[in-house]
Image (cartoon, rainbow, N blue to C red):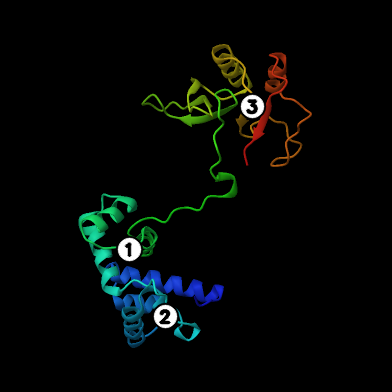
């Protein structure tokens, strides 16, 4: 497989997205030429290359041979036509299945997804940050609880309330949920006490960096593990000496 520089790949992908939008009839070929910054005559040459070599044909031919997995132009046009005309209410996974079952089009799921995304027919997925990567759940209830508060207008009027919720990581069961006027040390302590009284002690708690849980010397700085907040002291009073409070990134 030919090796391309980062700049070559980025340029090729930008050009490919513009041409996919032209194939999907979202822009004209003249508009595509203007966006890329080439003449109409050059665009006709680009389109011919695209017809001959498929997706990989957008890369500089002097750098190597076209990919054997390239997608023919006519096939790409058909996929980009079928989705908005007949399957716009389906997600990409179901559309890919329909292409195989109903249309007899054998393309990989990844190529179909990238074609739809490049043409602007479906949204691109946001990349997960390192701290958002999926991790295994705890194997047993009570090993890790999630505590969080969120602001809502939950009563069909102008009033705002905080919803304090405690969820078990292993089972996704809600151990506690209560509307309060404002999340505070008092309401958080009440939530934890109610959860312990109902379900018993737990091993670890996952929370945000709110001042109910952590003290910090500077805004956005590292949290202190030695200086306990009122919530931390309350947990020690309840015998939760082995409790570990985890910090969200």
What is the distance, in whole Å, between disc 1 and disc 2 at their CAs? 31 Å
Depth check, mark 1 against mark 2: the one in front is 1
For marks 2 and 3, the one nearer the N-term is 2
For marks 1 and 2, the one nearer the N-term is 2
> Who is closer to the viewer here, 233 or 196?
196
Q: At x 34% / y 64%, what residue is drawn?
A: 119
The location of residue 181, given as percent across then percent down, is 51, 22
Depth check, mark 2 against mark 3: the one in front is 3
Q: Is residue 194 above or below residue 37?
A: above
Is 244 displayed left or right of 94 in the figure? right
The crowd level at tag 2 (other Cα within 10 Å; few <14, some 14-19, many 20+) is few
State the SS at label 2. loop
The location of residue 32, given as percent across then percent down, is 35, 75
Depth check, mark 3 against mark 1: the one in front is 1
Farthest residue toward the right? 226
* Res 107 label: 1
Q: Quadrant of the C terminus?
A: top right
The location of residue 122, given as percent across then percent down, is 35, 56
For marks 3 and 1, the one nearer the N-term is 1
> Who is closer to the viewer here, 72 or 58?
72
What is the distance, in whole Å, between disc 3 and disc 1 at their CAs? 46 Å
What is the distance, in whole Å, between disc 2 and disc 3 at their CAs? 57 Å
The location of residue 184, given as percent across then percent down, is 60, 23
Is 61 displayed left or right of 86 in the figure? right
User: In the rendered structure, are the residues bearing label 3 and label 1 in contact, judged by CB atoms less than 8 Å apart?
Assistant: no
Q: At x 30% / y 50%, what residue is drawn?
A: 94
State the SS at label 1. loop
Residue under circle 2?
Answer: 37
The crowd level at tag 3 (other Cα within 10 Å; few <14, some 14-19, many 20+) is some
Residue under circle 3?
Answer: 204
Q: Is residue 168 above or below residue 75?
A: above
User: In the rendered structure, are the residues bearing label 2 and label 3 in contact, judged by CB atoms less than 8 Å apart?
Assistant: no
């Amino acid at each position: 497989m030919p090796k391309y520089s980062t700049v070559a790949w980025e340029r090729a992908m930008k050009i490919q997205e513009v041409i996919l939008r032209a194939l999907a009839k979202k822009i004209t070929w003249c508009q595509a030429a203007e966006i890329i910054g080439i003449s109409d005559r050059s665009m006709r040459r680009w389109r011919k290359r695209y017809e001959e070599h498929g997706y990989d044909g957008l890369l500089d031919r002097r750098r190597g041979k076209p990919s054997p997995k390239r997608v023919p132009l006519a096939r790409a046009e058909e996929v980009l036509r079928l989705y908005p005309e007949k399957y716009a209410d389906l997600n990409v996974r179901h559309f890919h299945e329909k292409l195989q079952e109903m249309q007899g089009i054998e393309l990989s799921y990844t190529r179909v997804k990238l074609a739809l995304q490049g043409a602007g027919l479906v949204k691109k997925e946001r990349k997960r940050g390192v701290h958002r990567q999926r991790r295994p759940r705890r194997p047993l209830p009570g090993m890790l609880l999630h505590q969080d508060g969120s602001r809502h207008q939950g009563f069909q009027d102008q009033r705002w309330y905080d919803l304090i919720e405690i969820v078990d990581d292993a089972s996704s069961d809600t151990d506690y949920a209560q509307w309060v006027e404002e999340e505070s040390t008092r309401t958080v302590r009440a939530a934890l006490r109610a959860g312990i009284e109902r379900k018993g002690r737990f091993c670890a708690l996952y929370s945000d960096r709110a001042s109910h849980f952590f003290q910090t010397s500077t805004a956005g700085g590292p949290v202190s593990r030695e200086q306990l907040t009122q919530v931390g002291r309350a947990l020690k009073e309840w015998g939760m000496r082995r409790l570990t409070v985890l910090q969200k990134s």
